[in-house]
Amino acid sequence: MGAIGTDECLEIVSQYIHDDSQEVAETCVLAVSRIGQAIDIQEGRLEDPYRAGVPVYFNSVDPAFPLDDETDAHTLGDIARTEAFDIYLRYTALFQLRNMRSTEAVLELAKSKGHTPMNSDCYGKYDL
């Protein structure tokens, strides 16, 4: 519903941002944030990062825009793994890592998913 981005969707998902299920609540927080961004872009308060030159490598509608600064992969990984941060900020870090397409970013993404690669040399053979 966040990808649809209408006022009607905002009204529906807003009802569930405090749901007893953490997964439902966080999904709705992401949707509310994404719809808010779409409205801000439409009303000229926010520039669409993809129209501003952010490279698009994936054909997807993401629940959060990538973080819009030059933060290094390690710091982005820390943001993504820190549960004290807002879920939306954590997702912006994840999508920025994805868009970096580097070995360091892949390793940080793996750590964010709870995995620690045994041998990081195996990533060298893939063209990221």
Image (cartoon, rainbow, N blue to C red):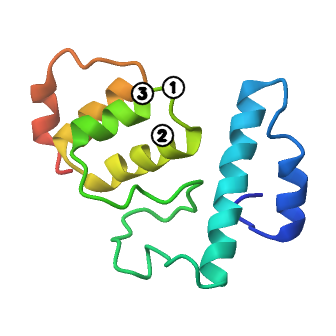
The answer to whether residue 121 is left or right of residue 61 is: left
Give the residue pinned by disc 3: 81
Any part of residue 70 in sight: yes
Q: Mark 1 touching mark 3, by CB under 8 A?
A: yes
Between the C-alphas of marks 1 and 3, the distance is 6 Å
Q: Residue at x 54, y 76 (%)?
A: 46
Amino acid type of the residue tagged 2 in the rendering: Arg
Quick one: SS at disc 3? helix
| Residue 25 placement (x, y as % from top left) | 76, 35
Q: Mark 2 touching mark 1, by CB under 8 A?
A: yes
Q: Residue furthest front?
A: 45
Circle 3 Cα neighbour tier, 10 Å, few/some/many (<14 / 14–19 / ≥20): many
Residue 24: quarter of image: top right
Give the residue pinned by disc 1: 83
Give whichever of discs 2 and 1 has the lower sequence position.
1
Circle 1 Cα neighbour tier, 10 Å, few/some/many (<14 / 14–19 / ≥20): few
Q: Residue at x 44, y 27 (%)?
A: 82
Q: Mark 3 touching mark 2, by CB under 8 A?
A: yes
Q: Residue at x 42, y 35 (%)?
A: 80
Residue 125: quarter of image: top left
Give the residue pinned by disc 2: 90
Q: Residue at x 33, y 71 (%)?
A: 55
Q: Is residue 29 above or below residue 60?
A: above
| Residue 93 placement (x, y as % from top left) | 40, 45
| Residue 39 placement (x, y as % from top left) | 69, 74
Q: Is residue 96 above or below residue 20?
A: below
Any part of residue 109 in sight: no
Q: Residue furthest top?
A: 118
Quick one: SS at disc 2? helix
Quick one: SS at disc 1? loop
